[in-house]
Amino acid sequence: MSQATWTISELAREFDVTPRTIRFYEDQGIVSPSRAGRNRVYASRDRARLKLALRGRRLGLQLAEIVTLIDLYDRHHGSTTAQLQHYADVLDSHRQKLEQQRCDLDETLKEIRRQQADCQALLRDRRNGASASTQSSQAASDQPLT
């Protein structure tokens, strides 16, 4: 049996978010609970919109993209070809951005590894040079003065 309404605390527990997160989505117009005195009362529509918003956030979508997708869903009350195509386009664009970021991160990590290797080699050279210098100083001090 499906519950007809939820409190902010119930939704926060269900989706493992803070009430503040839900209030943020309310401020953005994603959810619009009714009021029972001072308490917010969320209907099934609010719960579905919150679920979609949190899914979009997990995917790393921008708030504007999330709102557009939710509004499309709301207008068509389910999946239409246009809605699915738009969602597929948004996901494709987002995937391409993430793949580019991954390539950029891989290049940055390679450069960091090269710099670390260079730094370690310089440190080894200096330690070896200091050891050689110390050894020749000790050898010289072992020589009798004439």
Image (cartoon, rainbow, N blue to C red):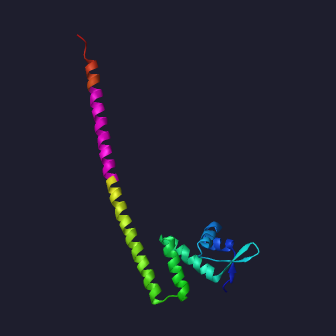
Q: Quadrant of residue 21?
A: bottom right
In the image, the segment drawn in magenta is 112-135
Q: Position of residue 129 (x, y in %)?
A: 27, 33
Q: Quadrant of residue 51?
A: bottom right
Q: Residue at x 59, y 80 (%)?
A: 48
Q: Main secondary structure of the magenta part?
A: helix
Quarter of the image that includes the C terminus = top left
Q: Is residue 117 magenta?
A: yes
Quarter of the image that includes the N terminus = bottom right
Q: Position of residue 75 (x, y in %)?
A: 54, 86
Q: Nearer the viewer, residue 45 or 1?
A: 45
Q: Nearer the viewer, residue 134 or 53?
A: 53
Q: Is residue 43 left or right of residue 53?
A: right
Q: Residue furthest left?
A: 146
Q: Position of residue 134 (x, y in %)?
A: 30, 27
Q: Is residue 120 left or right of residue 87?
A: left
Q: Is residue 41 magenta?
A: no
Q: Quadrant of residue 127?
A: top left
Q: Position of residue 58 (x, y in %)?
A: 51, 71
Q: Is residue 131 left or right of residue 1?
A: left
In the figure, 45 relative to 122: above or below? below
Q: Residue at x 40, y 73 (%)?
A: 95
Q: Nearer the viewer, residue 70 or 28?
A: 28
